C-alpha cells in the first residue's frame, strides 16, 4: 500500500482517537490543577477520610451532599443537584451563584482549567 492510499485510514484513525487523547490530556491536566487548587481541602482517593471538605472520589453521578462527610451546608443538602459534567462545571464556575449559601468558596473561572478539573473528577471511579 502506498503512502497516499494510507492517508484516508490515518485520517479516520486520528478523528476517532483524538477525543480520547484530548480527554486523557484533560484529566491529566485536571489532576495537576486539583492538586494545586482543591487538595488543600478535598481528598480524591477511594476510602480516604475527608477532613475539611468531602472526598470527591466517585463524585460523578452522585447526589450532592450524599457522602458520609458530616459538614455539608444546608444549602447544598437542599440543592437537589446530581454531579454531572454540566452541574460540576456550573458549580466550579461560581459555587455561590449556583448554590447560594454553600460553604464552597473556591471557583475556577477559566473554562479550560475548569473543564480539565471536571474531566479529572469524572474519572475518579
Image (cartoon, grey):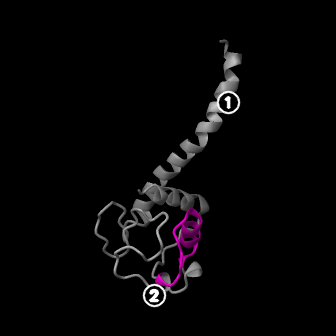
- Looking at the image, residue 98 sits to the left or right of residue 52; the answer is right
- Answer whether residue 85 is visible to the viewer in this image: yes
Tell me the residue that label 1 is attached to. Answer: 11
Residue at the image position 40 percent from the left and 66 percent from the top? 56
Q: Residues within 10 Å of mark 1 (few under 14, many from 20)?
A: few
Residue 112 quadrant: bottom right
Q: Could you say where residue 3 lies in the image, as x and y percent from the top left? A: 67, 16
Residue at the image position 60 percent from the left and 40 percent from the top? 18
Quadrant position of the C terminus in the picture: bottom left
Classify mark 2: helix, strand or loop.
helix
Q: Could you say where residue 102 lies in the image, as x and y percent from the top left? A: 49, 83
For residue 57, the mark is none
Residue 46 quadrant: bottom left
Residue extending furthest toward the top: 1
On screen, residue 26 above or below 107:
above
Bounds of the magenta span?
77-95
Quadrant position of the N terminus in the picture: top right
N-term mark: 1 or 2 = 1
Magenta span includes 6: no
On screen, residue 43 above or below 98:
above
Residue at the image position 46 percent from the left and 82 percent from the top? 77
Q: Residues within 10 Å of mark 2 (few under 14, many from 20)?
A: few
Q: Could you say where residue 14 lies in the image, as x and y percent from the top left? A: 62, 34
Q: CA distance from mark 1 to mark 2?
A: 52 Å
Between 104 and 33, the residue placed more toward the observer is 104
- Looking at the image, residue 64 sits to the left or right of residue 53; the answer is right
- Looking at the image, residue 16 sits to the left or right of residue 124; the answer is right
Tell me the residue that label 2 is attached to. Answer: 74
Amino acid at each position: 500500500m502506498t503512502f497516499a492510499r494510507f492517508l484516508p485510514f490515518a485520517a479516520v484513525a486520528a478523528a476517532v482517537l483524538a477525543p480520547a487523547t484530548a480527554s486523557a490530556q484533560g484529566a491529566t491536566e485536571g489532576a495537576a490543577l486539583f492538586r494545586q487548587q482543591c487538595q488543600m481541602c478535598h481528598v480524591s482517593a477511594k476510602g480516604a477520610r475527608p477532613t475539611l471538605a468531602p472526598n470527591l472520589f466517585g463524585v460523578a453521578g452522585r447526589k450532592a451532599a450524599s457522602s458520609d462527610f458530616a459538614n455539608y451546608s444546608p444549602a447544598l443538602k437542599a440543592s437537589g443537584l446530581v454531579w454531572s459534567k454540566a452541574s460540576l462545571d456550573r458549580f466550579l464556575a461560581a459555587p455561590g451563584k449556583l448554590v447560594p449559601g454553600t460553604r464552597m468558596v473556591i471557583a475556577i473561572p477559566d473554562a479550560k482549567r475548569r473543564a480539565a478539573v471536571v474531566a479529572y473528577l469524572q474519572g475518579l471511579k
